[in-house]
Amino acid sequence: MAETPNRTTRSAMTELEAGKGEPFDMAELGGEVKFSRYETADYLKTEDDIAAYLDAVKEDGDPALIEAARDDVTRARSRSANAASTKREG
């Protein structure tokens, strides 16, 4: 489910688009910052999640995005099947 930006976020986005945003130095966070790769399939836990995701992607209408979403769903269902298989074996 997509979230609607709140007033503060919209205000910050408007400032950035107008070239008024302030630079941010990641070092200010104190220490090394690590990012992990975002994997959509990790968040598609149920068939309801999958249906909502596919509805949102179809609404966008971008064929490349639809194809990528199908791949995400395939990975999510494969992980779910593997997890269920592991539970039965264990």
Image (cartoon, rainbow, N blue to C red):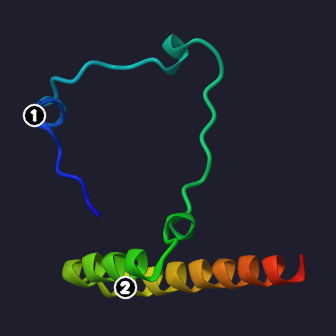
Q: Position of residue 43 (x, y in %)?
A: 50, 64
Asked if marks 2 and 1 touch (Cβ < 8 Å), the reply is no
| Residue for point 26% across, 60% down | 2
| Residue for point 11% across, 31% down | 11
Name the residue beneath numbered marker 1.
Answer: 7
Q: Quadrant of the N terminus?
A: bottom left
Q: Position of residue 86 (x, y in %)?
A: 82, 78
Q: Position of residue 44 (x, y in %)?
A: 49, 71
Foreground tag (2 vs 1): 1
Q: Quadrant of residue 69?
A: bottom left
Q: Residues within 10 Å of mark 2 (few under 14, many from 20)?
A: some
3 or 31: nearer the eye? 3
| Residue for point 35% across, 75% down | 53
Q: Quadrant of residue 84?
A: bottom right
40 or 17: nearer the eye? 40
In terms of secondary structure, where does tag 2 sit?
Answer: helix
In terms of secondary structure, where does tag 1 sit?
Answer: helix
Side of 76 relative to 57 (left or right): right
Q: Residues within 10 Å of mark 1 (few under 14, many from 20)?
A: few
Name the residue beneath numbered marker 2.
Answer: 66
Q: Quadrant of the C terminus?
A: bottom right
Position of 42 relative to 54 (above/below): above
6 or 47: nearer the eye? 47
**Callout 2, which amino acid?**
Ile
Q: Position of residue 40 (x, y in %)?
A: 50, 66
56 or 14: nearer the eye? 56
Side of 80 relative to 65 (left or right): right
Alpha carbons under labels 2 and 1: distance apart = 30 Å
